[in-house]
Image (spheres, rainbow, N blue to C red):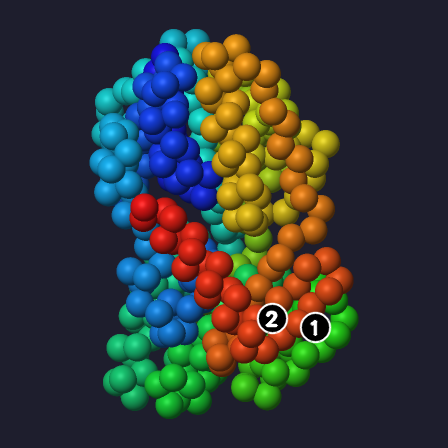
Amino acid sequence: MRLALVGAGHAHLSVIAAAERLRKAGLDPVLVAPATFDYSGLAGAVLSGAMAPQEARVDVAALARTSGVEHRIAVVTAMDRATRTLMLADGSIQPFDLVSLNIGSVVDDLPGTHPAVWPVKPLSNLFELRRTLEVELAAGQAPALVVAGDGPTAFEIAASLIGLHERLGRTPDVTLVGPDADAGWAPSGAARRLVASLDRRGLRRVRGSVVNHAGGEIWLEMDQVFPCDHLISATGLRAPALTTRLELPLDPLGRLRVAPTLQSINDPALFAAGDCAAIEGHPRPFAGVFGVRAAAVLIDNLCATTTGAPLRAYRPQEQWLSILDLADGTALAMRGRLWWAGRLALWLKRRLDRGFVKRGRA
């Protein structure tokens, strides 16, 4: 039975590594995905200059070769569920009997025509932003940087940009713009500590939303105008456009609606995990942890479709550990309303993140 794995996200890295088990269950896996995978947990460390890009990168092609999985380095543009075929950007097709999607998420578009907009996804954008800023700072420039967004990612990106300036001995010009610029998503004590720390390091926080950007400036509501040489977009995530072309039920953010078995509620031959999937009865935010935790269930259920074993249900945890790299040698760790900050939190984050990348390279 032909199994097409579309995307090489957190869940599919484990599925690829379990290829021998898939084959024993009667599945013939083929991967359709880019050659590399950039791990989001280390994106802030790369942006701040604390780590090199290759330290956060998994060689998907090498993992596929080691696991004996056919790998087509291509992009899926459409799917014909009637004929069970995938259409690829190069004009070729890939047949399947079962298909699993683990294609992540993309950033909401911002209005305007600013020539230097850097969405936080794909993560390669942030790596290129670092290289660009290093060149500009080395040339004596002092670029005005604006982070649009007010969630955990936006705050971590702002901290990383400040950290990059500190590492290079330059004074940062970083502004964070969002309706809640006080980190209201964090436990109250953690939020106070976070904003106080970033304020001391030079972050400018502005309440509002970017409504336009052009000509080296951004506009907020009430005609507020700020200089902006680089605009980093962290305003929110949604599923990639591919999900809208499948003619399957979606949630308001474009994620495929799946049962707890990770099968589409309208097509049991289509599985999805991670940011591109919304599990019925279990609302959750975009976070890589859910793709990691879903991997074991996804592997079991793919095998069960051929062996006749009962399918398992994946129920996402209600609380999870989140650690923000503050790019000053410390991190902020949170789980529910519990939190702690300091060097130990950063040590734990590095250990967990490096462990994930190492496993992906095995």
Label 2: element kind: strand
**Labels 1 and 2: the sequence-earlier one:** 1
Q: Where is residue 113 in the image (x, y as percent from the top left)?
A: 42, 59
Q: Residue at x 38, y 9 (%)?
A: 83
Q: Which mark is residue 332?
A: 2
Residue 170 vs residue 163, the one in the foreground: 163
Specify whether residue 81 is in view. Answer: yes
| 70 displayed left or right of 11 | left
Dot 1 alpha-carbon crowd within 10 angstroms: few under 14, some 14 to 19, many 20 or more: many
Q: Distance between the residues labelled 1 and 2?
A: 8 Å
Q: Quarter holding the N terminus?
A: top left
Packing grade of label 2 (10 A; few <14, some 14-19, many >=20) is many
Q: Tell me what residue is drawn at x 30 percent, y 71 percent.
A: 132
Q: Residue at x 45, y 31 (%)?
A: 101
User: Of 196 and 56, which appears nearest the observer?
Assistant: 56
Tell me the quarter of the picture where residue 150 sits.
bottom right
Q: Name the residue under label 1.
A: 190
Position of residue 18 measured from the top left corner of the image (x, y, whole percent): 38, 32
Query: Do the CB atoms of the residues marked 1 and 2 lie less than 8 Å apart?
Result: yes
Mark 2: amino acid: Leu
Instruction: Tell me which amino acid carries mark 1.
Output: Ala
- Callout 1: SS: helix
